[in-house]
Image (tube, rainbow, N blue to C red):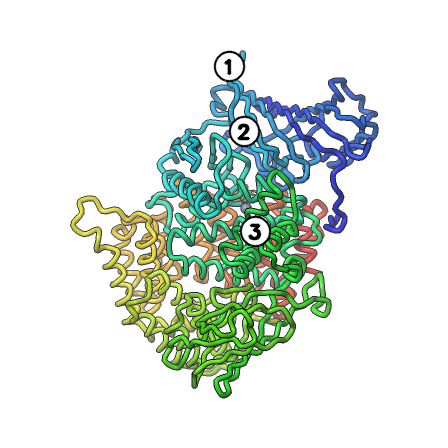
Amino acid sequence: QIVKYLKDYAAPNHLVPKVDLLFDVQNEYTDVIITLHIEPQNNEKTLILQGDAKLLMIQLNGERLPETAYSLVGEILTLPNMPTVPFTLTIQTRVFPEINKSFNGLYASDGNLYTQCEPEGFRKITFHPDRPDVMGVFTTEIRADKQKFPVLLSNGNKIRSGSLPDGRHFAVWHDPFKKPSYLFALVAGQLVATSDVFVTKSNRQVAIEFYTRPEDADKVAFAVESLKNAMKWDEERFGLEYDLDVYMVVAVGDFNMGAMENKGLNIFNTKYVLANSQTATDSDFEGVESVIGHEYFHNWTGNRVTCRDWFQLSLKEGLTVFRDQEFSGNRASRAVRRIENVKLLRTHQFAEDASPMAHPVRPASYVEMNNFYTMTVYEKGAEVVRMYHTFLGEDGFQRGMKLYFERHDGQAVTCDDFRHAMADANGVDFSQFALWYSQAGTPTLNVSGSLQNGEYILDVKQILPNTPDMPASEKKPMMMPLAIAFFDENGKKISFRQPEHPAVSNTEQTETVLTVNQSEQSFKFLMNANTVTPSLLRGFSAPVYLEFDYTNKELALLLAHDDDAFSRWEAGQTLFRRAIAANEDALKNGEMLPEHTELMDALRNVLNNQDIDPALKAMLLQVPAEAELWGERDNLNPVLISMAREALLEQIAHGLHSELLATALNAREAENADKRGKEIVFYEYNPKDAGLRSLQYACFGLIHRFDEIATIEQVFEYYDEMARKNMTHEWGVLSAINHNHDPKRDELLARFAAKFDSQALVMDKYFMLIASSRRADTLAQVQAALNHPRFALDNPNKVRALIGTFARNVPHFHAADGSGYAFVAQHIKKIDEFNPQVAAGLARAFNLLQRIEPQRQALMRAELEQIVALPNLSKDVREIVEKILA
Ligand code: HT7
Ligand code: ZN
């Protein structure tokens, strides 16, 4: 395995400021001719290019080079005797998109052609340095059959097009902005455009074009609207305006990730473009809005200012996730969106940080870059950006952004450059903050408090974990914001002063942000109070575990009264976690389950409280996911934890049946209220109705446990009526009864599949239902689904829906006989033969290996050892599996 290290970075010896491309599309192959206008640096004579395509010929300044003038070893083309003054190199390659199932480079999907070049896919098309600090102005000509490929697209503006002999035609695209090769894109095929216009703040007209298959054109309106909202929002919040005359989005069903921000020509997984109320749930709509925003925001944070090298990936991804989170939060339910983001981070990123795959936000090494598009780089990276924002406030943060663009527009830069811009624009020292980029693992803040004579002392200890790359003993204390407030016994905020804080020592405050930057430190507050319950880490002000020895009563107080939605939710989550832990102990010891009176009372209060926003109420009812409960525990039995969690859900369903029912009915009533009396009733996505629906199904997901037989009968009878409203309702009822053993469940799922047979994205939902069921026959049903005519092992969405969902189905993936591990491992091996990126994604399911109890650990290990023994295993899967086994 060749490991690449950040410490070995060296500036490029050859720049390529201009690139001319010609794609000659034929039936079985495409010939690509690239002309690189090369500027040697430091009199360097040896030119090194990257390429993984069939090499046909090379010309130097128009003269063909003999084969003796270069050598090609693996993907590295070495040309030893190149001029030291500017020259051109023209290279012809041949690629075979029809047989490319890796969905990297140039590939065919449904007869059309698409590219995916980030991070190192350009080299699968042609030869180039293919590193992000080599930027150029691209001109691209595409020639193809006019009937088969009526639409020919690339980056920038179309400057010429016309007919060619033999029923062929051509188009020439020119992108005036210098860009790295990973932002190159080409699309050719039979697509229809849905068009719109956006007028920028400086009054320029930007043409918006969304390309889809003709039958999907009725599902793009929401994405188009979301794009226009994103364009406007970026102007208003960040002062950033779009820079080309056209913004194109192309939807494709075969795609490895969510979407790709290629300059002026985004390519999207259909999942994040196509949505109408009959095929997409409210959360699908929210996914479209956020990914459309994310890719658009990359135009400045990623494209105009890009990464110097791939170690700096979080420079663009962390920042752009922060921006898309702010955009989505601005649209509606900011507090709920924040909680959703924290939940995502804590379920998946914290797990990654506690696994053999742990790495810093700026990784120090990698074997396969595709393996580093991780929750850590994206989601923890966004939290790092959010911490700058918390320290500096909106104005200070925007000053930093302004300086960042002033200094670096058109450049390829580092995370340090971003940090310096934030620091210099505000005169703040962020040198200690740099540790967030180099130290992996989730810190723990251990906090305790004591009140004496009106003086409250908060003691904060910072504990850093061991990670595979660095022992805790080598780690230095990090700098982070700790947002706090205090509540009295009636749930009222206590006002306080900070005598040690010169700037505010005489100011009465009710909340503040502390700077934690040492292993141990104390903060003093003066207040007039008898009992104090601190509200800590408000808004999740830093990506850490927080330990504070709350009583259940204090947690109930915060859950009832805290005005910070995150802290309120977190108080409930802690009560849930405690109850599940107590259930686990009882199950382990064969004892009666405890009653959890305080939790039940607190939940009853939440359900009865009419002042809580429905979407937030739905979040407050959500029990932590299984992966969140694993935390940093060792020797864990995931199935026992899952049983303890299920037992709590049953207890809530029975203990609060009537409150849940009343809440669900009220929410349904409120959703229907403004539709009654109208001739045509729309159950469309809008944030208010989405909140009411999420509350209905948060309740219904519990209610059905009260009497599963009666529920399935009822659902069976009213299914068509529910389903007719919209996909959120249809999905809500099917998800709730999905675990039911009654044959009616199978019949409902079969009806669902038959109804949506021609809708690929809805069929993904069908496969998800099959794979997420807790029914005893789930593995058998998943195996049968592999032969369903709409399942395809070479389609990443289908693989994620069926096999990926199964790998997260805790009782089945972790079945004691190892059948779940064997099933997933078998498919990792199969898929790796044509799509290593997707196979490596599945391999992460085994991340838990070293922390799982010995019997399951042995079963997992046996599967992984078989995988690494494969002679042709990809470096993608090998890197992941070897790390897990290490
Ligand atoms: N910047 C993109 C990351 C990406 C990707 C996208 C699609 C297929 C393969 C890919 N490899 C890397 C997506 C983003 O963060 O916006
Ligand atoms: Zn991104």
Q: Earlier in the sequence, mark 3 or mark 2?
A: 2
* Residue at 42% from the left image edge and 73% from the top image edge: 648
Is 700 placed left or right of 808 in the picture?
left
Distance CA(mark 3)–CA(mark 1):
50 Å
* Residue found farthest to the left: 677
Task: Look at the numbered disc 3 and give the secondary structure of its residue.
Answer: helix
**Residue 78 image position (x, y, % from top left):** 79, 32
**Residue 685 image position (x, y, % from top left):** 33, 49
Q: Is any atom of residue 679 visible in this view?
A: yes
- For the C terminus, the image quarter is bottom right
Q: Earlier in the sequence, mark 1 or mark 2?
A: 2
| Residue that numbered label 2 is attached to | 154
Pick whichever, 766 or 695, lies toward us.
695
**Amino acid found under the numbered disc labelled 1:** Ser
| Residue that numbered label 1 is attached to | 163
Q: Which mark is residue 400?
A: 3
**Amino acid found under the numbered disc labelled 2:** Ser
**Looking at mark 1, is its residue's CB closer than 8 Å to ligand 1?**
no
Q: Earlier in the sequence, mark 3 or mark 1?
A: 1
